[in-house]
Amino acid sequence: MQDNPVIRVVSKVMIPTVMLFALYVQFHGDYGPGGGFQAGVIFAAAFVLNAMIFGLNRGRHVWPANLNLLAICAGVLLYGLTGVASFFFGANYLDYDVLGATAKSGQHIGILLVEFGVGLTVASVMVALFFTFAGRLTHIRLLSKMQAHEEVSPPANKPKKKRQTGARK
Amino acid sequence: MSGFLVNASLISLLTLIAILALRLHRLFAVVMLSGAFSLVAATLFVVLDAVDVAFTEAAVGAGISSILALATLSLVPAEEKPHSIAFVPAFLALATAAMLAIAVTDLPAFGDVNAPIHNHVAPEFIKGSADDIGIPNVVTSVLASYRGYDTLGETVVIFTAAIAVLLVLGGFTRPHHPKNKSPKSQSRITKRRKNGEGKNAG
């Protein structure tokens, strides 16, 4: 797939468009269909497409794993802490009325924040799932290669196993 | 009449795709068919005026699920193993389907204003949304504000699922370098990996 010029060029046009559309779905969810869940999945699709076309390693480079873990937690925390913020203004948990000057603007701010939290978590979870599943193959190959290396380098005490590894290669 | 035609064709298309997915043994084709199933289901949701649900179904069911299934396909054989019909599960499935079919006749008609679902909290939400929340999309105001706890729970479910998958499938582990590990535990881990791989390839 990486060598096909048509797919490479088209995906370079598509990926920013998909991300822009995801942002539209995210922040326009108050006015039309959409919201955090859908936007998160669409946003993740852009990164998955990037990883599929340009290889898993370059995809991982664009969206590093430790940053991804941070984003997964940050989304849930943003949701939960928006609820906690209501406490400081003397309201119940997840009651957004008090977050703004008027009840309506407070609701608007609250919904925007929690939807962004949902979107962040969903997007990073989807990317993490794809990278984990797709990374299994290289993981398994690497392990078997290291196994072969480990058995070749010291003086072999299990000749039977060594032959097995050779046959697999 | 045209509505009936659209519904009938969509539902027969769904049934056709489901039967095809059951009959085929090539897993790539089955994954593609499940994506098509989700897309047709999303169309059906649009017909039922549930645009937000249709959006989710198209994005998650037809998009990401298919991609995850494809990523998994690279680890498993391309063909399903041939197997004979398992009679007890088939009987259970048919019995459940029959019970559901009987139960459907007891449901209120689609769009019935006297249906219980339209007389509980829904009228309050629909009437109050403009005054309380002030955003045009009632679905978002119910999802994020009236039912904020539920959505928080859903987000935590997704979070938990991701943590579980990352733990099980080795997102956190790195292939151990022989120098860092005692040779005994190293060989045990790699042996298990190799056995697992052998099973998948064969």
Image: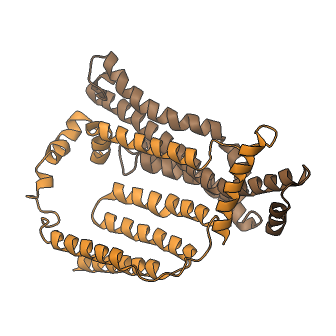
Quadrant location of the N terminus of chain B in the rendered image: bottom left
Q: Residue at x 7, y 58 (%)?
A: B114
The answer to which of B60 and A161 lies nearer the viewer is A161
The answer to which of A117 and A70 lies nearer the viewer is A70
The answer to which of B79 and B60 lies nearer the viewer is B79
Is residue A160 among the parts visible in the rendering? yes
- Colour pattern: by chain
- Compared to A46, does B92 lie above or below? below
Quadrant location of the C terminus of chain B in the rendered image: bottom right
Relative horizontal placement of residue A25, taking residue B91 as reference (left or right)? right
- Compared to B23, does A20 lie above or below? above
Q: Measured from the top left, where is residue A79 in percent x and y?
A: 41, 33
Q: Quadrant of residue B157?
A: top left
Chain the render paints brown: A
The shade of chain B is orange
State how many labels appear.
Answer: 0
Relative horizontal placement of residue B26, taking residue B14 as reference (left or right)? right
Q: Measured from the top left, where is residue A20 in percent x and y?
A: 55, 48
Name the outermost residue toward the left.
B114
Q: Residue at x 55, y 43 (%)?
A: A124
- Compared to B74, does B132 lie above or below? above
Is residue B175 among the parts visible in the rendering? no
Q: Measured from the top left, where is residue A40 in percent x and y?
A: 49, 47
The answer to which of B169 and A72 lies nearer the viewer is B169
Q: Residue at x 70, y 43 (%)?
A: B174
Q: Measured from the top left, where is residue B55 in percent x and y?
A: 40, 57
- Compared to B83, does A81 lie above or below? above
